[in-house]
Amino acid sequence: HKSWHSHIENIKTHKNSPKNSLIGQIKAREAALIIVDLVKKNLIGGRVILFSGPIGSGKTALALGIAQELGEKIPFCMINGSEIFSPTSKKTSLLYEKCRKAVGLRLFENHEFYEGEIADIDFCFSREINCFPCPFIIVFLKTTEGSLKLKLLDSLYEKFISKELKKGDIIRIEPNNKSIRRLGKSLNFFTGQIEEESRYLTTPTGRVFKKKSTVKEMTLYDLDFLNFHNTEKKGQVKVEKTDQLYNEVNLLVSNYIRDKKAEIINGILFIDEAHFLDRESFGYLSKILDSPFPPIVILATNRTTFFKSIFPSNLIFPIGFLSRCLTVKTRKYDQKEISSIVSLKSRENKNFLSGNCFLELCKIA
């Protein structure tokens, strides 16, 4: 089954744009491409964009086209305005969670580890604590470019023993994480018979001590979840998501950014049929947009928005909220554009329509 907007892969406006592009709405698409460029450059965090136009004029399609242009690296969260009214959760909590899902975090991690083939193992004892024997292991690791002697104590000693590591095994030791992993067995110890659960590898290249830089991407919501889970695990009680816990995560992220260990990715929260939101929701949304790590919010509505109304009580959106919105208007499709959309969707769904049937369907559309 194909959805109404499954054919949209981009919002390009030039003549040589791919076939699966949004049809019509040239001015709105040009504005959307400017938005895409600013989002990619991380320049409009905390801004509000309002898609306003009649029913069926492509507001949702335009937002989904923006998501396709941004790609998977930039978060895009989509909800309907009526979804925040839940019998089980507060609307402010749901709104905040959706905003956290729309903000990405790129973490830069440097891993230090030792990797090599076990050349020799010495089991030793020392009398350091109250004259009681303290066991440790001296392990000799080698690579194609050298060897290194390591002393394993405490938890690393226990993990080495529990894994029953032997001479010829290729291992990785991460001292910061207190972990030891068996990667396989050296081909130098291959006897001609393949042992069960054995993976034969060549002797590792380079030095025994290695550094590796990795980039991990997640959303602030993912980081919130990890923080709440760890708090619950420590306290052994159910912890409610409070402002205090959110502030702890924000402080952690701020420290990461200050130390250049992370960077924020301002993604997009798209709220379709935003006229369902009440004044309390708009007030809370304004508060979120003024927070340290806000998303870009795109609202879509088919209701009329009066910026200069002399009757503020008749406004669908609070006038203070409207004043911070950048509006992109969409218009009704003409008959030629509707025919193009019906033709494209029928080809995508492999429904070949006859002449009279096609014309009748265009009239209905």
Image: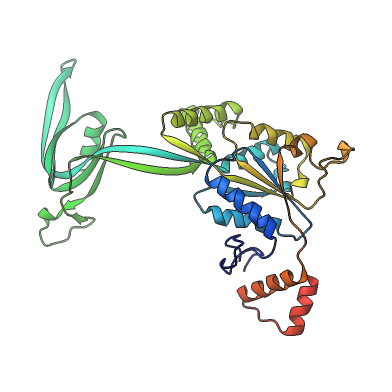
The image position of residue 117, as x and y in percent, is: 15, 46
Residue pushed farthest right? 311
Q: Quadrant of the N terminus?
A: bottom right
Taking depth in this image into account, of 253 and 1 the one nearest to the observer is 253
Q: Residue at x 24, y 42 (%)?
A: 172
Q: Quadrant of the C terminus?
A: bottom right
The image position of residue 42, as x and y in percent, is: 54, 42
The image position of residue 201, as x and y in percent, is: 19, 54
Name above or below for residue 183 compared with residue 126: below
* One can see residue 165 in this view: no
Q: Is residue 105 left or right of residue 121?
A: right
Taking depth in this image into account, of 117 and 23 the one nearest to the observer is 23
Q: Residue at x 74, y 47 (%)?
A: 274
* One can see residue 158 in this view: yes
Image quarter of residue 96: top right
Q: Is residue 297 left or right of residue 330?
A: left
- Type of colouring: rainbow
